[in-house]
Amino acid sequence: MRPNPPDATSVVLVHGYHVDALQWEEVVWGRPAEDRLGRVPRAVLLALGHPDPVLLFGTGAAARDGLLESEYTLEFARSRRHELEDLARRVLPSAAIARVGELLHERSRCERTSATTRTEVAAGFETALSLGARHLTLVSSPTHVARCHQTALTLLATTPCYALLAHGLAAVASDTTVAGRGPGDVVVLEPRTRAAGAVEFSDVARAGGSDGQAEATSR
């Protein structure tokens, strides 16, 4: 399979965060003026680095003020457009600043049906394929992004049509998460590669959740 052309359409998926979760703004937005980027600013910078980006907001799992989670997050980003332009001015070429408005309006989409990490990642794949994209970047918090990537790899292995995106798949962490937590708090249980004991702990953990993943309410 040949690598994807560098100018292909790129989808950047901002993983949703439950609108009633603790420290929502810190996790989703962060503090861009201090270069502490939440999920949305990180995704915006990544999208602006592509010539033909689509910014996809997930999910439909929760709602606030009559808006689904994805819609609420996008409207919040639009209301803070000036902060994103200031961020782009500091770290990207000057031409990128003028593209922030276009990205948040003409090039943003809301994904409204998913309710779990697995269905959200699947929606990212489906959106990318429907647009003819060959790049899909998943953006989430440092305590969630490893799971997003593992989910995407599982879907690649079980859904043949997603193989078109295999060379263009990436997962990128934001800077912020819930206070007092970090990537070191994430537990990874790999299948063992050498015979050692009768219990395969990864099997035990996988049995505790749907398709190996017990869905957290806040993601």
Image (spheres, rainbow, N blue to C red):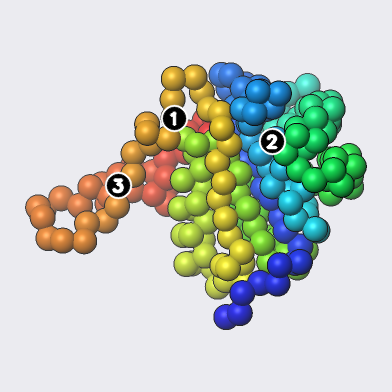
Q: Which of the two residues, 206 or 132, is positioned nearer the viewer here?
A: 132
Instruction: Please tell me whether residue 160 is drawn above or below residue 190 in the rendered image.
Output: below
Give the residue pinned by disc 2: 40
Q: Earlier in the sequence, mark 2 or mark 1?
A: 2
Give the residue pinned by disc 3: 189
Q: Residue at x 23, y 47 (%)?
A: 201
Query: How far is the residue under mark 3 from the one under mark 2?
Result: 29 Å
Q: Is residue 24 visible?
A: no
Give the residue pinned by disc 1: 182
Q: Name the amino acid type tagged 3.
A: Leu
Disc 1 secondary structure class? loop
Q: Earlier in the sequence, mark 1 or mark 3?
A: 1
Instruction: Please tell me whether residue 196 is drawn above or below residue 73 in the rendered image.
Output: below
Disc 2 secondary structure class? helix
Q: Position of residue 7 (x, y in %)?
A: 76, 66
Quarter of image, res 60: top right
Circle 3 crowding by C-alpha within 10 Å: few under 14, some 14–19, many from 20: few
Q: Which label lies toward us, 1 or 3? A: 1
Q: Which label lies toward us, 3 or 2? A: 2
Q: Residue at x 80, y 58 (%)?
A: 51
Q: Earlier in the sequence, mark 3 or mark 2?
A: 2
Q: Residue at x 85, y 43 (%)?
A: 94
